[in-house]
């Protein structure tokens, strides 16, 4: 009981240090979803990139099998392909969340969600709700914050 109280105090102190980027918890089974961001210029119909960190508390790997949103025609799992003709984007069928590890879909990395024909007017309070489906952990709905600068938004969670 005493240990639990200490942990809570530490969490509150961390939140106070960065009140702007506190986000609601989102989890599916042992998976914890944080740093949920969608980059948007504010223009409708553009393909927009989304990012997330998914931590797995279980030793068993899981797979992210699909993502959907009322705010987009569809959501693809894009990987930057740095070929000889310049960078392009390939769509992966699934992404693995390693056991006792994390899937990092981070600005500046090779991975991003691609929200095809994104509609920013679907946002409420600056957030859009995405549904992520995992092979074992099932589906979870989570709010993603819209940002004009994904790298700065990601770093603001540090
Ligand atoms: Cu893409």
Image (cartoon, helix red, strand yellow):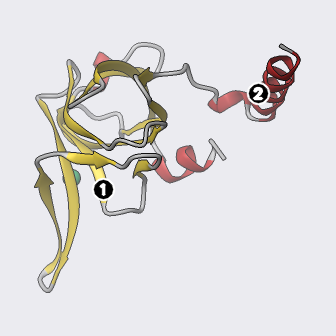
Q: Does the rendering let one see residue 40?
A: yes
Q: In the displayed structure, does residue 68 sit left or right of residue 145?
A: left
Report if residue 45 is visible in the image. no
On screen, residue 80 above or below 15 = below
Image quadrant in which the N terminus is located: top right
Query: Which residue lies under the disc numbered 2?
Result: 11
Where in the figure is residue 114, as x and y percent of width and height?
Answer: 22, 44
Q: In front: mark 2 or mark 1?
A: 2
Q: Quick one: label 2, few (<14), some, or many (20+) residues within 10 Å?
A: few
Residue 101: % across, % down: 46, 49
Local packing at callout 1 (Cα closer than 10 Å; few below 14, some 14-19, many 20+) is many
Residue 33 circle label: none
Give the answer, above or below, for where 6 lies relative to 150: above
Total numbered labels placed on residues in the image: 2
Q: What's the residue at 30%, 56% (across, down)?
A: 111
Q: Residue at x 24, y 48 (%)?
A: 95
- Tell me: is circle 2 under 8 Å from ligand 1: no
Q: On residue 111, which mark appears?
A: 1
Judge by depth and name the residue closer to the eye, 25 or 136.
136
Location of residue 113 (image quadrant): top left
Look at the numbered disc 2 and give the secondary structure of its residue: helix
Residue at point 40% right, 23% down?
A: 29
At which x and y percent is residue 69? 22, 23
> Eyeballing the image, is 98 above or below 44?
below
């Amino acid at each position: 009981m005493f240990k639990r109280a200490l942990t809570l105090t530490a969490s509150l102190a961390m939140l106070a240090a960065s009140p702007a980027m506190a986000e609601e918890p989102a989890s599916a089974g042992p998976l914890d979803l944080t740093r949920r961001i969608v980059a948007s210029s504010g223009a409708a119909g553009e393909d927009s990139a989304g990012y997330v960190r998914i931590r797995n508390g279980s030793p068993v790997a899981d797979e992210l099998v699909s993502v959907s949103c009322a705010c987009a025609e569809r959501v693809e799992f894009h990987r930057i392909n740095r070929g000889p003709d310049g960078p392009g984007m390939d769509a992966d069928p699934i992404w693995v969340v390693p056991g006792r590890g994390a899937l990092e879909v981070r600005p500046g990395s090779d991975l991003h969600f691609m929200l095809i024909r994104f509609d920013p007017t679907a946002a409420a309070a600056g957030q859009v709700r995405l549904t992520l489906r995992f092979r074992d952990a099932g589906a979870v709905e989570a709010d993603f914050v819209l940002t004009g600068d994904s790298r700065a938004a990601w770093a603001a969670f540090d």
